[in-house]
Amino acid sequence: MNGKMLSFHLFGESHGKAVGVLIEGVPPGIRVNLEELKAELERRKGISKFSTARKESDEPIIISGVFRGYTTGAPITVIVENKDVDSSYYEEIKDTPRPGHADYPAKIKYFGFNDYRGGGRFSGRLTIGFVIAGYFAKKILEPVGVKIKAYIKRVGKVEARNMSIEEIFNSPNPYCPDEDAFKEMLKEMESAKKSGDSVGGVVEVVAINVPPGLGGPYEDDIEADLASTFFRIPAVKGVEFGLGFKVSEKRGSEVNDPYVIKNGEIQTVTNNHGGIIGGITTGMPIVARIAFKPTPSIYLPQKTVNLREMKETTIKLKGRFDSCIVPKALPVVEGAMAFVLADHFLRRLAWERYVHLSKEF
């Protein structure tokens, strides 16, 4: 994930020694609270009842870039060890690609040399890196008051109602502010689990207090950068901003956001564009929705092929699987958004500094 000021690179495999992230471009002098970072990683474990039985402590080990509790300006390397690993079953199915997984295309791409255990590099376990990178990005955004909140908008066919920004950010429920909908979502997850199946859903993420003027047209488009980063999260199959695809059903008079002055600031009456127009932030909340497919690891029999024998066969997976990964995705999505916003924020700061200096000159 390469921005112009910030970048991060994921490494490791699901059943390897560790997974981790290398983050470059973080300014020096940012206070690092290890307990806060641990809390973010804890959120990624999701709802235990519907998550994998694989239990990892997910203790972050900072290798470089932090000294005496502060960032140094050097590249930050953080690893998380894999301790609760059981690879035995993957040896049995290494020649029978699991439907919905990257097993087959990965085998072709890497000529069979890839680590296939637990999905290897394609595993959702590597999303730990998004959360860690997002933690540092949120720290960069703290001084300007940017806050980011992701919640479950939908599980299967159960969708949360539309809610105000205040409801979303002030809700005590860490998964969904709509308590009634959340109860039905849990039932949907339970139903999928009992049937040996899985269920997908949608995460909505909102960023408030985002300064106007971040981004640009074409290659600097912040909407494109956000979408690109969201799509790098495993299992993401769709992204939309504001009204999203619904704008195609409407007329311009219905979706244009009229400008007004409120409390001395330029705002819009509505926010159909989701806080971004022309690839540039407007100062209104950025609202995006990210669609996650059902995890392909299910307990039902599925058709596949034996690549070694070149015969069609049936596979019935054994192992430790999530019935719904959507709850685990919340801090991952937040991390992705925070990182893009932080990158564009640092770009904007450089411009502002130059304009200020040029006026003085």
Image (cartoon, rainbow, N blue to C red):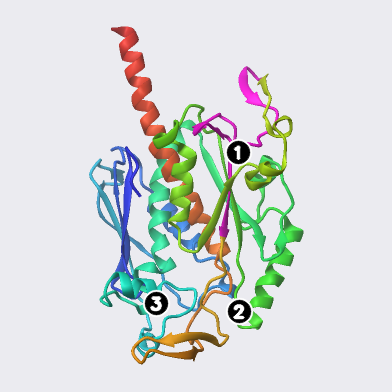
Binning the other alpha carbons within 10 Å of mark 2 as few (below 14), some (14 to 19) or many (20 upward) gives: many
Quick one: 84 or 328, which is closer to the camera? Answer: 328
- 3 or 1: tag closer to the N-terminus: 3
Upstream in sequence: badge 2 or badge 3: 3
* Residue under the point 47% across and 45% down: 226
Q: Nearer the viewer, residue 99 or 350?
A: 99
The answer to whether any part of residue 138 appears in the image is: no
Residue 322 in view here: yes
Question: Mark 1: which secondary structure?
Answer: loop
The residue at which mark 1 appears reads as: 274
Query: Which image quadrant: the C terminus?
Result: top left
Give the Cα distance between marks 1 and 2: 34 Å
Q: Which dot marks residue 118?
A: 3
Task: Tell me the SS state at disc 3.
Answer: helix
Residue 305: image x %, image y %? 44, 86
**Which numbered disc, 1 or 2, marks the residue that appears first in the sequence?**
2
Q: Return the x and y of residue 259 as percentages of the image width and height.
A: 66, 22
Measure the alpha-carbon separation of dots 3 and 1: 37 Å
Instruction: Find residue 88 and report its horizontal and vertical position in percent.
Output: 36, 88
Label 2 near label 1: C-beta < 8 Å? no
Question: Does the segment drawn in magenta span residue 267?
Answer: yes
> As shown in the figure, which amino acid type bears the numbered disc 1?
Gly
Q: Residue at x 76, y 60 (%)?
A: 180
Q: Residue at x 66, y 59 (%)?
A: 154
Residue under label 2: 197
Specify the segment rendered in magenta: 262-291
Q: Amino acid at mark 3?
A: Gly
